[in-house]
Image (cartoon, helix red, strand yellow):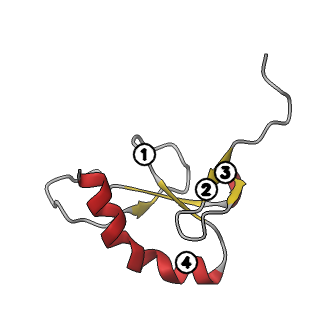
């Protein structure tokens, strides 16, 4: 039985705090997989396939996210 008004939560990959999914920006791998080291692209509709990275709206997290991508991408490659 689903709860009415339930909002899924996701964790910001930078600050590791939980937020309602609608408050976060989602990034996914680009559809063109011919470029192996391509950076994730924003997914504003939050409906593209695959796992995504969620980043909160804090300026500090948005600034640090590009720097964290290298480490995040290495973990996904395993």
Question: Which circle marks residue 62 in the picture?
Answer: 4
Residue 12 on image: x %, y %: 59, 62
Measured in 3D between alpha carbons, the distance from the residue under mark 1 to the one under mark 3, in whole angstroms, is 14 Å
Residue 67's place in the image compared with 54, above or below, is below
Front residue of 37 and 13: 13
Between discs 4 and 1, the one toward the N terminus: 1
Left or right of 61: which side holds 76?
left
User: Which residue lies at the image location 58% right of the left edge and 77% below the top edge?
Assistant: 61
The image quarter containing residue 18 is bottom right
Camera-near label (2 vs 1) is: 2
Residue 70 on image: x %, y %: 31, 71
Left or right of 46: which side holds 6?
right
Between discs 2 and 1, the one toward the N terminus: 2
Measured in 3D between alpha carbons, the distance from the residue under mark 2 to the one under mark 1, in whole angstroms, is 13 Å
Badge 2: residue crowd in 10 Å (few <14, some 14–19, many ≥20): some
User: Which residue lies at the image location 63% right of the left edge and 83% below the top edge?
Assistant: 59
Residue 71's place in the image compared with 21, above or below, is below
The residue to which callout 1 is attached is 51
Front residue of 33 and 15: 15
Question: Which circle marks residue 9 in the picture?
Answer: none
The residue to which callout 2 is attached is 11
The residue to which callout 3 is attached is 21
Camera-near label (4 vs 2) is: 2
């Amino acid at each position: 039985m689903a709860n009415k008004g339930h909002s899924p939560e996701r964790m910001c990959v930078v600050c590791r705090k939980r937020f309602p999914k609608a408050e976060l920006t989602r990034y996914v791998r680009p559809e063109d997989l011919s470029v192996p080291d391509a950076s994730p692209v924003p997914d504003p509709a939050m409906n593209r396939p695959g796992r995504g990275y969620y980043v909160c709206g804090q300026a500090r997290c948005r600034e640090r996210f590009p720097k964290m991508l290298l480490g995040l991408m290495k973990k996904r490659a395993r």
